Image (tube, grey):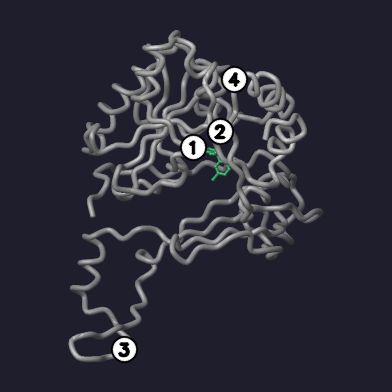
Amino acid sequence: MAQVGEKRKREDKAENGSGDTDTGPSVPSHHPLSGFQLQAVLRESARDKTIFLHGKVTRNAQDAEDAVVILERVPFQADSVSRLLAERPELKLQLENDIYSVYHLNPPPELNEIKTTVICPATEKHIKKYQRQDVCLIHETGDDYDSVTLPFIEAQSLSVQWVYNILEKKAEADRIVHENPDPENGFILIPDFKWNQKQVDDLYLIAISHPRGIKSLRDLTADHLPLLKNILHEGQEAILKRYGLRGNQLRIYLHYQPSYYHLHVHFTALGHDAPGTSVERAHLLCDVIQNLEREPRYYRTRTLTYALRADEPLLKKLKDAGKC
Ligand code: DD3
């Protein structure tokens, strides 16, 4: 498995925005999972080797906060596993039959990493997001967007503070892979949270646009072509330079609906089945550019199809308005 040839700087940031009052030494307030108590298993997947947990944590002595904790086994790296095997690791035999045998191998700690994502304090929305749910397909016309979806998005006023922190270099500044600083046609390319950056097989970066106020694919017009082309071409070039993957080894796309309403483009390794690449959600950037070149208001007017979870408030709004 190919590895990322970059030395990664340690991130020693305590980006603890909330509730960090001094409550004395009784509860260690520095550990992000202090006093973790499981509330519920939100979802698990044996295939993906992930589990999503809802828990309570007590980062300060007074009150327990809701947290979502995501645990994920990380991919293997050829060189570290080949070193391990060459060192004659202890193998516990499970079964033997003809030329076949199966063992338990307990790896050393450095090969036993569990990627741990913590969202704390987590809102009811975060907790719901990771619960399994029925989904329902929506065909949203341009008018549906104007009359239902847009007012809904605006009423929600979802925070994209973390995006602004990246754009203003207040967070993750040392992780930036490429920046075009132009306020109108520029962007920042940065590894997505979902990627541990240790192997390019599951490479996942996002390009975040410098201009603010472009909420999603729906807002794009021919005016944004220079920005989109910069993202496509400079993004490919930067990834080739840093990670050695060519443009034809990358899946470059936007989501509709996106999970946050600030224009961003996903770059994932073509060989990796990244989440969110289904036909009802992903729109290839090269197609988006072509469509806008042919029809400047293409995404303002066309019907966009996407799936919503049965419990999503937007689905209820669309149903109430008789749109599905
Ligand atoms: C998010 C969508 C948002 C849980 C999780 C992620 N890449 C991020 C904050 C910083 C980031 C991302 C929401 C939030 Cl795990 C809930 O994503 C982020 N920084 N996707 C990077 N580099």
Of the image marks 2 and 1, the number of the one nearer the N terminus:
2
* Alpha carbon distance from label 4 to label 1: 17 Å
Of the image marks 4 and 2, the number of the one nearer the N terminus:
4
- Helix, strand or loop status at disc 2: loop
The mark found on residue 142 in the picture is: 4
Please report contact status of discs 4 and 3: CB closer than 8 Å, yes or no. Answer: no
**Count of marks overlaid on the render:** 4
Q: Image point 66% across, 22% down: which residue?
A: 150
Of the image marks 1 and 3, the number of the one nearer the N terminus:
3
- Disc 3 residue: CB within 8 Å of ligand 1: no
Q: Determine which quarter of the picture holds residue 102.
A: bottom left
Observer-nearest of 136 and 117: 136
Q: What's the residue type where badge 4 is placed?
A: Gly
Q: What's the residue type where badge 2 is placed?
A: Gln
Label 3 CA crowd tier, 10 Å (few <14, some 14–19, many 20+)? few
* Alpha carbon distance from label 2 to label 3: 49 Å
* Alpha carbon distance from label 4 to label 3: 61 Å
Q: What's the residue type where badge 3 is placed?
A: Leu
Q: Determine whether, in the image, residue 13 is placed left or right of residue 34.
A: left
The mark found on residue 281 in the picture is: 1
